[in-house]
Amino acid sequence: MEVLLYTILTLCALGVFSAVILYFVARKFRVEEDPRIDEVEKMLPGANCGGCGFAGCRGMADALVKRDDISALFCPVGGGDCMKAVAAYLGKAAAEKQPEVATVRCGGTCEKRPRTNEYNGAKSCAVASSLYVGETGCAFGCLGFGDCVAVCAFDAIHINPETGLPEVDADKCTACGACVKACPKMIIELRKKWPKNRAVYVSCVSKDKGAVVMKACKAGCIGCGKCVKVCAFDAITVENNLAYIDPQKCKLCRKCVNECPTGAIRLVGMDPLPKAPKAPAAPAANKES
């Protein structure tokens, strides 16, 4: 009985002694953390989406406090107002950044882009993309398995069952970029967010030649360059058989929409310009008898 008692007392003494040692070691080597990190973290939205480039809001807050220049840091969920508030609290200057929205650049609906085969495997765009080009003749188009939907933390993107394509709710989208990273076909792009969710963009990423595109998808860009000729703002370029509209240069004049022969240029939130009537053919001059 005495042996058991001595054993218990010894273990208790060792425990207390170890605790004391650990306490003084922790006090000696503890790292002081700037209390402003906690305050900045509270000012951030707390989404922990990773859109800022850090694993979570805590990492972003730590960087905002420790860096002298925070112009390269931006929280897409909180937006400009959030960054201004943080900068004012820290006494630093925050960079101005225009609001953005995720944009799906593929118009290959089930009707426009018929299936040529059936995929029988894991319902994942990443898996399917690693195995083959997809269920249609277009090697660049959306696979439609919804990897982008799975990673969206804001319920801002869903697959339309009729078209088979993802659709973005611009009012819910925070431009965190998660869907952009998740898409193996790279058809989702963060583009300038216009007032009233207006937009004009080329809804295609295919770099195939026109004849190949038309065989695979009736809504693809054939690189004809007609849109370039009518753009007065130098906002459209054609490279590798594909037209691209620069959202920073585009003025939403909509002239390119009417010129596109395949409808690859998509217009959102606005009515198209009325098409000018064709001029009647000049009457043939009467020959004198």
Image (cartoon, rainbow, N blue to C red):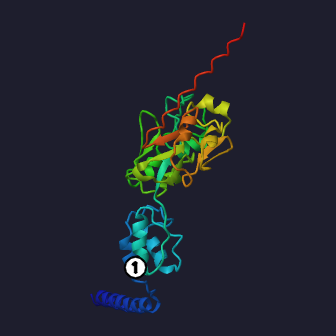
Q: Residue at x 49, y 28 (%)?
A: 111
Question: Which amino acid lies under the numbered mark 1 shown in the image of this protein?
Answer: Tyr
In the image, is 176 to the left or to the right of 11?
A: right
Toward the front, the furthest residue is 288
Viewer-proximal residue among 121 and 273: 273
Q: Residue at x 67, y 40 (%)?
A: 241
Viewer-proximal residue among 128 and 110: 110
In the image, is 133 to the left or to the right of 151?
A: right
From this view, report whether residue 47 is shown above or below residue 238.
Answer: below
**Is residue 215 visible in this depiction of the protein?**
yes
Where's residue 277, x and y in %? 53, 28
- Identify the secondary structure beneath mark 1: helix
From this view, report whether residue 281 is shown above or below residue 21.
Answer: above
Q: Residue at x 31, y 90 (%)?
A: 9
From this view, report whether residue 241 is shown above or below residue 32.
Answer: above
Toward the top, the furthest residue is 289
* Total numbered labels placed on residues in the image: 1
Q: Which residue is mark 1?
A: 89
**Is residue 147 visible in this depiction of the protein?**
no
Q: Residue at x 52, y 79 (%)?
A: 67
Where, quadrant-wise, is the C terminus in this rendering? top right
Where's residue 200, x and y in %? 51, 45
